Image (spheres, rainbow, N blue to C red):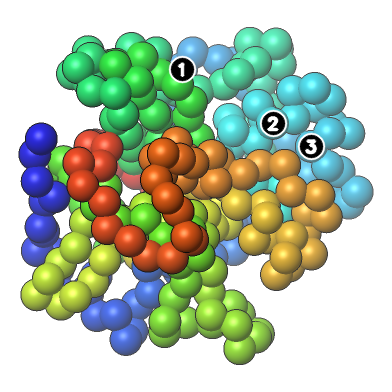
Amino acid sequence: MKPLVIIKLPLLLLISNVIPCFAALNKVQTLCDIPYPSDRRIEWECMNLKQRDNPTRLFGKYWQDVLRFNRIDRRHFIAGLSVKVPKRLEEIKGFTPMPAVYPNAAKEAKFILIDQSELFLGVYKYGRLVFSSPAAVGVEGHRVPNGEFRIDAVDRRHESDTYPIEGTGDAYPMNYGLRFAVDRLNWISYWIHGRDVPGIPASHGCIGLYDEEMQSRYYRDPKEPILVDAKRLYAWVAGSLDDSGRFRKIKNGPRVLIIGNPPV
């Protein structure tokens, strides 16, 4: 097993008292201008969302697939935003841009591939895709570093010790945290965790997955949590552990490979 990779990152990324691992979301008006390599496989058109539009009303049984296609969660599916809508919805059933087979992980029971060019994460068992999820990655100037890492700690109730949820005194939740890298010079940790997924790069170094439980609790939107990919990944990594919900180190955690450059 390869050890955890310790990385040295640019100063701007590492000043924890100035920049959190999550970032305030920039307002975006269109997701149609974001080019993904996998877009070439599917014909789509741009739709501007109106008041009272919601994914289930517009797309029926394919609503989750359309959200995945746009790398967005329900809380950010709002009037005024333009989104990509495939011309034939049945073509995106179970949508994922991640390869179904990843030969370089054929000997590994657990392997995580993050493709920043697709804003997507894939989970592999002996080289075969088990599940995948849209991912929020780092904003320009604070990108998630590419390279090979390893999950070395878990923390189901992880939260920021510096930044609150906007407009509150509550610490920003980073639920279902999986630590994949540490810069020991500046004592900054990098995690995969639950957060908002707005369809664009949105963090300052972490990888964010769907966490509608958190959104429902703190923002009351959506009312009923359905998209919980961060929870699912956490269970896959830590399921066999005696998990107290608190921070704990683990040995020989899944290897994490981060590749590509974000499209925006």
Picture coordinates of residue 141, whole percent (x, y): 27, 63
Image quarter of residue 226: top right
CB atoms of marks 2 and 3 within 8 Å: yes
Q: How many numbered circles does the render carry?
A: 3
**For the residues marked 2 and 1, what is the alpha-carbon distance in whole angstroms?**
20 Å
Residue 83 shown left or right of residue 69 in the figure: right
The residue at the point 61 percent across, 88 percent down is 169
Image quarter of residue 127: top left
Which of discs 2 and 1 lies nearer the camera? The answer is: 2
Mark 3 neighbour density, 10 Å: few (under 14) some (14–19) many (20 or more): many
Asked if residue 68 is positioned above or below residue 31 in the image, the reply reads: above
The residue at the point 79 percent across, 64 percent down is 220
Asked if residue 247 is positioned above or below residue 133 in the image, the reply reads: below
**Quadrant housing the N terminus:** top left
Residue furthest front in the image: 242
Picture coordinates of residue 44, whole percent (x, y): 63, 21
Mark 1 neighbour density, 10 Å: few (under 14) some (14–19) many (20 or more): few
- SS class, disc 1: helix
* Residue designated by label 1: 40
Asked if residue 91 is positioned above or below residue 28 in the image, the reply reads: above
Picture coordinates of residue 100, whole percent (x, y): 39, 13
* Residue designated by label 2: 64
